[in-house]
Image (cartoon, grey):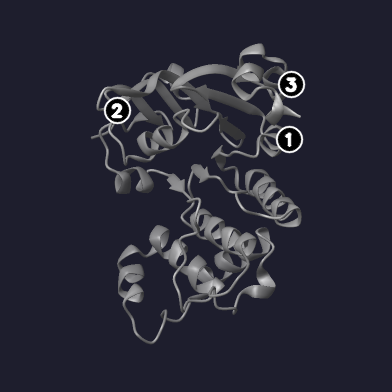
Amino acid sequence: MTVAVSPSRAGAALEVIGLSVAFGGVVALADVSLSVAPASITGLVGPNGAGKTTAFGVISGLVHPDAGRVVLDGVDVTGAPAHMRARRGLGRTFQHPQVFSGLSVRDHVILGDRVRHHRARMWSDAFLAGGLRRQPADERERVDDLLGLLGISELASRPVDGLPLGTSRLVEIARALATAPSVLLLDEPFSGLSGAETDAVVSALRRAVGERGVALLLVEHDVPTVLALSSTVHVLDFGRLIASGTPAEIRDDARVRAAYLGDALV
């Protein structure tokens, strides 16, 4: 079920309002509210066990909140299942890239494009033993543009099997962007990456925002990279939102420094 909300909240690409979740009496989220502006990068950070994964689960529709609302592009989607949120413009990547063995880099982006433009064809292709059906010209142009945007054009024909982790992340991000989301959730996009791989993903994300206008919300343990990349950062600790602001404000916040013992903010 989706419900229109008041125009005063329509300026945010994503807004969560008063989210609370408890598992067996253990509070995972307590009255958490945050927003993500259109065409922006927003970070969600916090120590282990702070509630970040639960927040992503609620936003993406995999966890039902005990209280609160999730508003996507001005529409209340709190009661909508995950696949309906995806159709309304919510994309997501995962900490461990979800790639299909035997398919090429290009094939993965084609599948994302067909989710958006040819859903029935995408499902038939997924089970086609000979591979994906031939691309029409407009689809090829969209896919080529995305491969270029993510900096992986030269790998288009390469099977995903055996790709470095950083490249697999770029493939997953490209596939997610091919569905044309207005908001993309990124689950630890820099986890396990080398410095060079992190730089490549950071550059790709900045291009995605600048050229596609997508809004990004990322959960990440690499706090210095989040602070360097994001325009707004929200900080969770023990299920509660303890700070929201610019990277400079987050660095100077005494509650945040106490939560991290100062170590992650340098």
The residue under the point 41% across, 65% down is 114
Residue 150, position as x, y percentages in the image: 65, 59
The amino acid type, in three-letter code, at marker 2 is: Pro
Q: Nearer the viewer, residue 137 or 51?
A: 51
The residue under the point 63% across, 17% down is 258
Which residue position holds label 2?
65
The residue under the point 70% across, 51% down is 198
Q: Secondary structure at mark 2?
A: loop
Give yes or no for contact between labels 1 and 2 (Cβ–Cβ under 8 Å): no
Q: Nearer the viewer, residue 58 or 150?
A: 58
Q: Earlier along the polypeptide chain: callout 2 or callout 3? A: 2
Residue 18, position as x, y percentages in the image: 38, 18
Q: CA distance from mark 1 to mark 2?
A: 31 Å
> Residue 58 bears which disc, if any?
none
Q: Quadrant of residue 260?
A: top right
Which residue position holds label 3?
248
The amino acid type, in three-letter code, at marker 3 is: Ala
Where is 85 relative to 146, above or below? above
- The 10 Å Cα crowd at callout 2, few under 14, some 14 to 19, many 20 or more, is many
Left or right side of 239 for 201: right
- The 10 Å Cα crowd at callout 3, few under 14, some 14 to 19, many 20 or more, is few
Which residue position holds label 1?
228
Left or right side of 66 for 175: right
Q: Earlier along the polypeptide chain: callout 1 or callout 3? A: 1
Q: CA distance from mark 1 to mark 3?
A: 10 Å
Question: Which quarter of the figure is the C terminus placed in?
Answer: top right
Q: Quadrant of residue 163?
A: bottom right
- The 10 Å Cα crowd at callout 1, few under 14, some 14 to 19, many 20 or more, is few
Where is 27 relative to 207, above or below? above
Q: CA distance from mark 2 to mark 3?
A: 31 Å
Where is 119 relative to 125, above or below? above
Left or right side of 228 for 112: left
